[in-house]
Amino acid sequence: MTHSTHGRSQCPTDLLLATLSGPWTMHIVWTLFEVGPGRFGALKRRIPGISSRLLTERLRMLEAQGFVHRHEEKTVPPQVTYAATERLQRLCSALEALGHVADEWYAATPRPAARREPPSAT
């Protein structure tokens, strides 16, 4: 791991975790990975409590980072579908392993009251 230079980390893991730690980002990633491609409205319904503005912001950021593919059909109105890229699928494999560790740890200790559960995939 590399030390920070002028307050900014050059460690790739730190940079990746900073990207994923933004508001709602992990929930969006989890939804796209578990549920698959979806249109904006469907994603918003699957993530209760997120605002349209924040969902748009996070999807744009994930697209810019290469984690999400945005496909727009030239219809009236335009139909936009968001899907996980191969890059996000690779990342989610690592996140699943991290999730197993978290499940084990939280099974052994009480969960914090503020922890949010992801919606069921049904």
Image: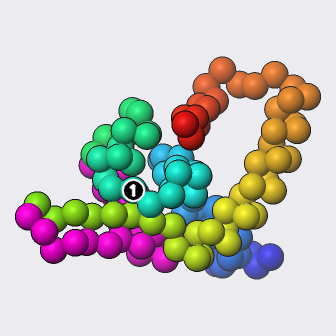
| Magenta residue span | 53-76
Q: Quadrant of residue 116?
A: top right
Residue sitting at x 55%, y 36%: 122
Residue sitting at x 52%, y 73%: 85
Q: Which is nearer the eye, 111 or 78?
A: 78
Asked if one can make out residue 113 in the rendered structure from this viewpoint, the answer is: yes
Look at the image and say whether residue 62 sits in the magenta stretch. Answer: yes
Residue sitting at x 22%, y 72%: 73
Q: Quadrant of residue 11?
A: bottom right
Looking at the image, residue 3 sits to the left or right of residue 117; the answer is right
Q: How many marks?
A: 1
Give the image location of residue 25, x and y in percent: 50, 53
Give the image location of residue 74, x and y in percent: 15, 74
Q: Which is nearer the eye, 11 or 64?
A: 64
Look at the image and say whether residue 121 sits in the magenta stretch. Answer: no
Asked if one can make out residue 7 in the rendered structure from this viewpoint, the answer is: no
Give the image location of residue 33, x and y in percent: 57, 57
